[in-house]
Image (cartoon, grey):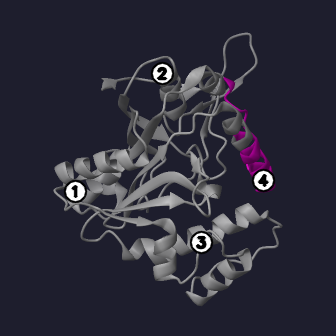
């Protein structure tokens, strides 16, 4: 596997409404100021290398995200990201499991479908439950939230309630003794993952891994269809506008690389700081980041 290095500064950032980039303002003498972005992930650049024929690749780099500062978050963090050609998300889960056993000395991980966890812990099917049912479930679980008058689309509403149930009712109960993989996410949370339409209902070929209360990694069987990827980016922009998030431009160079041809592959991003937290039983990111901004 080849180690690569990609830029931290780019003219583009992600369209995902759940991830906000940090802008950097660049001024060249005699020219208008440009808005650049510190990268939230090296994903787009690494996929451009894959499309150019790099083969399997990895890198350890810094990544940056707006608004992330707390016990488990820091606006600047270290990420290990890698891509395996010829792998799907199941193959990558196997490899991630071996990595965690090697570094953290864990037992082999447990694996659960997203729907199975919701049915077990909160008694609903997350793929078919209506927004009304999800909202009632959140209330029945004793989760407090601030009622707003925002008129949000069904997709935003569904994902909001599902996220509350996942973070408050499921995450605290899993992965204490050994890592846990959650896979087969709803298609509304597919991001850059393939959707398996042969499943009923269809699901995203995506996984997350949790250990000791920490989400350590997020992986996909990568979408290679440029037309579908553009459609998702455009849908993201509509959702961003609906939520009054800053507008961003679509990365056309990334889509052009998909048009050339991204090989069949799976990729995963692992939070190195959180991995260290898990290894040391640290309670806060401040304990493992030498020059953190602080959470107090």
Quarter in which the N terminus is drawn: top left
Q: Give residue 279's mark.
A: 1
Element type at mark 3? loop
Q: CA distance from mark 4 to mark 3?
A: 26 Å
Label 1 SS: helix
Q: Nearer the viewer, residue 116 or 22?
A: 116
**In which quadrant of the rendered view does residue 106 lie?**
bottom left
Q: Is residue 261 visible?
A: yes
Task: Provide the secondary structure element on which disc 4 rests.
Answer: loop
State the SS at label 2.
helix
Range of residues picked out in magenta? 233-252
Viewer-nearest of discs 2 and 4: 2
Residue 126's disc number: 3
Q: Residues within 10 Å of mark 4 (few under 14, many from 20)?
A: few
Q: CA distance from mark 2 to mark 4?
A: 33 Å
Indicate which disc residue 49 carries. Answer: 2
**Near-viewer residue (6 or 83):** 83
């Amino acid at each position: 596997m080849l180690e690569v290095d990609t830029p931290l500064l780019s003219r583009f950032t992600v369209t995902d409404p759940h991830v906000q980039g940090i802008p950097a303002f660049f001024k060249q003498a005699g020219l208008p100021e440009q808005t650049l972005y510190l990268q939230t992930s090296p994903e787009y650049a690494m996929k451009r290398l894959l499309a150019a024929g790099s083969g399997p690749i990895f890198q350890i780099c810094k990544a940056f995200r707006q608004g992330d500062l707390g016990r488990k978050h820091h606006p600047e963090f270290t990420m290990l990201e890698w891509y395996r050609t010829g792998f799907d998300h199941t193959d990558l889960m196997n490899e991630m499991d071996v990595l965690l056993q090697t570094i953290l000395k864990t037992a082999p991980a447990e694996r659960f479908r997203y729907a199975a966890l919701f049915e077990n812990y909160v008694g609903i099917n997350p793929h078919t439950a209506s927004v009304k049912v999800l909202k009632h479930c959140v209330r029945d679980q004793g989760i407090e939230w601030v009622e707003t008058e925002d008129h949000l689309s069904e997709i935003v509403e569904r994902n909001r309630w599902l996220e509350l149930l996942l973070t408050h009712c499921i995450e605290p109960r899993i992965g204490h003794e050994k890592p846990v993989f959650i896979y087969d996410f709803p298609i509304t949370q597919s991001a850059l993952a393939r959707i398996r339409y042969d499943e009923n209902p269809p699901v995203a070929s995506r996984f997350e891994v949790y250990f000791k209360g920490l989400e350590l990694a997020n992986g996909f069987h990568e979408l290679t269809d440029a037309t579908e990827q553009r459609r998702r980016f455009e849908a993201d922009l509509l959702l961003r506008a609906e939520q009054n998030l800053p507008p961003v431009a679509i990365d056309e160079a990334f889509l052009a690389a998909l048009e050339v041809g991204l090989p069949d592959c799976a990729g995963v991003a692992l939070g190195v700081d959180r991995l260290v937290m898990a290894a040391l039983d640290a309670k806060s990111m401040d304990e493992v980041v030498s020059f953190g901004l602080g959470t107090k």
